[in-house]
């Protein structure tokens, strides 16, 4: 009887954690998809799009060549429209 109760308690804990993770992912996806009605890109997206390293992206930020936005989780995001303007200016588009 105790084993069954213990198992059910653990399953509830695990399911609760999955729910918490799911809510966090939903919140992050909504943030990434829309910021002032615009699509947001993160560092990984930008590296793939521009074909550069994360360090190069950091240099662009330091030199204020590329506008960026941070969220409360500390992650950096870029508006797709501003990235497009940057790419046109750099001749990559």
Image (cartoon, grey):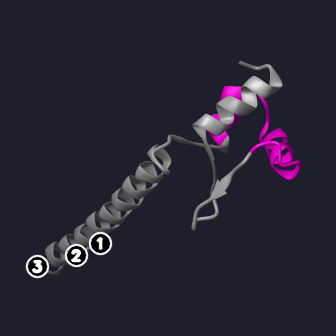
- Please identify, in this view, whether the residue under mark 3 or under mark 1 is nearer the observer: 1
Helix or strand or loop: what does disc 2 sit on?
helix
Q: Residue furthest bottom?
A: 2
Region in magenta = 44-66
Number of the label disc, if any, that sits on residue 69: none
Q: Quadrant of the C terminus?
A: top right
Taking depth in this image into account, of 80 and 52 the one nearest to the observer is: 80
**For residue 74, side relative to residue 23 (left or right):** right
Q: Position of residue 26 (x, y in %)?
A: 37, 54
Residue at position x 49%, y 50% from top?
Answer: 35
Point out residue 65 in the picture as x, y percentages from the top left corner: 82, 42
Please name the residue shown 79% across and 31% down the image: 52
* Residue 68 falls inside the magenta stretch: no
Residue at image point 64% right, 63% down: 74
Q: Real-space Cα distance between discs 3 and 2?
A: 12 Å
Q: Which residue does the numbered mark 2 point to in the structure image?
A: 9
* Circle 1 Cα neighbour tier, 10 Å, few/some/many (<14 / 14–19 / ≥20): few
Read off the residue under disc 1. 13
Kindly give the residue lying farthest to the left in the view shown: 1
Front position among marks 3 and 2: 2
> Alpha-carbon distance for marks 2 and 1?
6 Å
């Amino acid at each position: 009887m105790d084993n069954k109760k213990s198992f059910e308690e653990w399953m509830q804990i695990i399911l609760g954690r999955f729910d918490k993770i799911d809510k966090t992912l939903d919140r992050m996806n909504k943030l990434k998809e829309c910021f002032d009605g615009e699509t947001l890109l993160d560092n990984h997206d930008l590296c793939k799009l521009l074909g550069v390293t994360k360090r190069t992206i950091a240099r662009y930020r330091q030199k204020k060549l590329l506008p960026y936005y941070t969220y409360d989780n500390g992650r950096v995001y870029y508006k797709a429209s501003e990235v497009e303007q940057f790419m046109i200016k750099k001749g990559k588009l």
